[in-house]
Image (spheres, rainbow, N blue to C red):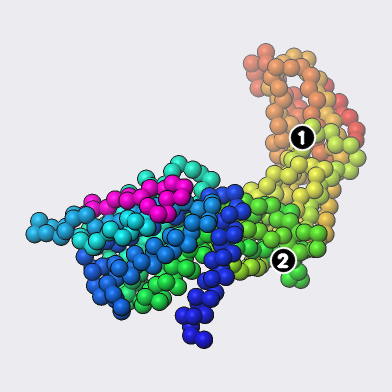
């Protein structure tokens, strides 16, 4: 069996499956054919003229799509209305010949029969105009299939235009089918979209089928979140698929393991490539993921995790105690975790800054695979400060002979209660009415876990 016959048989099965998928899927797919109608399409190509062969095979393809209920088609051509003359090239010679509409296949077939090559190759401008061809429907998949035999002749930048359309979310990554292009020309098209080189009439027919199959056919993938033993046991975390080319968000899922103990199967569009972000703490990223239409792809990501639990010995006097969590030796804040709650992290070491008074720092906390690491701090005590009058005051923690500031007293009240961690402290105070520093008062005191301490000034 020849290579081309094998491709054709493969296309038949893929294409049949694609039509069935398109009929049952809720999402509509809109395909815009952008056809080269420039002078060069007059050239001979095996058994006939390039334009004759291209339009005949395209008509057959459009006719075969009549049974795909959730698919709408449209046709734009360029270089087909004005001849190249002594006055130069018409670099705006492009037209939406048949707009998107249900059951417009016969209109496209009829129009394809009447297009004749005449002018120049204006790919960039045609792609710019194609942005207006798609109805305003954020739920649809918008796809461009560009068929050309030549390179841009109007000083436009097809790559930049294609990228802009994708970043704006107008279209998915376009398909480009080149008809007998030179190798140096092929390289110029690879940045425009998914490029296919059709060197002969038979390969062009096969490529058309493969492109349509990919355009219509969602494929499946599963994400294996691997533990430290390379087993896909991690789950229940959000994950985002970004388009590698446009950097747009394509899919959001929360990872699941199904009833058989396997990571769940995801329906993913095979167009383009993806960057996957697993929203663990910290996040994990895998770049350049490519899928093949009609095939199941397994994506493996290292994401071993364990849990961190924060607790206080005895009753927690703090109303809303939180902890800042950082990677060991790093300044970036990963997360602010609530006390008395459990949070998952990638395995490794972390530094904790617990927002007690004064703050509690715990370094090199190790998070191990599938284990819960519990960090417990002493129960706080309660300080009650009574002042004869309103004034200015501060509380300091004593570290040997060093006084470390903890907090200021309120200037609006004469009594105040403050939750403090166990340790040695000193309060420094001056009445609001005292105008001399020599009237400053100070008092040393101890805070013990679970006990109240009173200081009178």
Residue at image location 64% in from the left, 54% down from the top = 239
Question: Closer to the observer: label 1 or label 2?
Answer: 2
The part of the chain drawn in magenta is 91-107
- Where does label 1 land, which residue? 320
Spatial separation of the CA atoms under disc 1 and disc 2: 35 Å
Residue at image location 70% in from the left, 28% down from the top = 408
Q: Nearer the viewer, residue 142 or 245?
A: 142
Q: Is residue 155 visible?
A: no
Residue 247: x and y in percent read 49, 54
Residue at image location 89% in from the left, 30% down from the top = 452
Q: How many marks?
A: 2
Q: Earlier in the sequence, mark 1 or mark 2?
A: 2
Residue 227: x and y in percent read 74, 66
Q: Is residue 326 above or below residue 446?
A: below
Q: Is residue 130 above or below residue 291?
A: above
Q: Is residue 385 left or right of residue 8?
A: right
Residue at image location 68% in from the left, 57% down from the top = 328
């Amino acid at each position: 069996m020849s290579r081309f016959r094998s491709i054709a048989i493969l296309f038949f099965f893929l294409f049949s499956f694609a039509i069935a998928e398109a009929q049952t899927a809720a999402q509509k797919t809109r395909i815009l054919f952008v056809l080269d109608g420039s002078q060069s399409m007059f050239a001979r190509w095996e058994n006939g003229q390039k334009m004759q062969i291209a339009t005949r095979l395209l008509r057959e393809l459009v006719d075969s799509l009549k049974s795909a209920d959730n698919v709408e088609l449209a046709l734009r051509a360029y270089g087909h209305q004005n001849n190249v003359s002594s006055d130069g090239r018409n670099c705006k010679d492009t037209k939406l010949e048949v707009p998107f509409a249900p059951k417009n296949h016969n209109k496209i077939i009829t129009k394809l029969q009447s297009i004749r090559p005449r002018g120049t190759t204006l790919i960039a401008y045609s792609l710019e105009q194609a942005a207006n061809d798609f109805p305003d429907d954020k739920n649809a998949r918008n796809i461009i299939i560009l068929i050309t035999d030549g390179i841009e002749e109007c000083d436009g930048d097809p790559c930049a235009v294609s990228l802009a359309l994708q970043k704006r979310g107008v279209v998915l990554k376009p398909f480009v089918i080149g008809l007998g292009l030179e190798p140096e020309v092929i390289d110029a098209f690879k940045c425009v979209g998914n490029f296919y080189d059709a060197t002969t009439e038979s390969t062009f027919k096969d490529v058309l089928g493969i492109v349509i199959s990919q355009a219509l056919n969602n494929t499946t993938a599963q994400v294996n979140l691997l533990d430290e033993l390379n087993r896909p046991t991690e789950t229940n975390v959000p994950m985002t698929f970004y388009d590698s080319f446009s950097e747009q968000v394509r899919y959001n899922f929360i990872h699941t393991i199904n009833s058989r103990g396997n990571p769940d199967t995801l329906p993913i569009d095979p167009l383009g490539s993806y960057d996957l972000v697993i929203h663990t703490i910290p996040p994990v990223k895998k770049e350049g993921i490519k899928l093949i239409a009609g095939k199941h792809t397994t994506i493996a990501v290292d994401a071993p995790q364990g849990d961190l639990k924060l607790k206080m010995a005895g009753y927690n006097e703090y109303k809303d105690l939180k902890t800042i969590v950082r990677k060991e030796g790093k300044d970036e804040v990963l997360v602010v975790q609530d006390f008395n709650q459990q949070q998952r992290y990638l395995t490794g070491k972390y530094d904790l800054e617990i927002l007690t008074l004064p703050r509690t720092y715990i370094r090199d906390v190790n998070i191990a695979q599938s284990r819960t690491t519990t960090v417990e701090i002493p129960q706080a005590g309660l300080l009650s400060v009574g002042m004869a009058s309103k004034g200015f005051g501060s509380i300091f923690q004593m570290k040997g002979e060093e006084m470390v500031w903890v907090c200021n007293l309120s200037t609006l009240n004469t009594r105040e209660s403050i939750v403090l961690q166990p340790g040695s402290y000193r309060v420094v105070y001056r009445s609001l009415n005292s105008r001399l520093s020599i009237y400053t008062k100070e008092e040393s005191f101890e805070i013990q876990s679970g006990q109240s301490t009173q200081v009178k000034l």
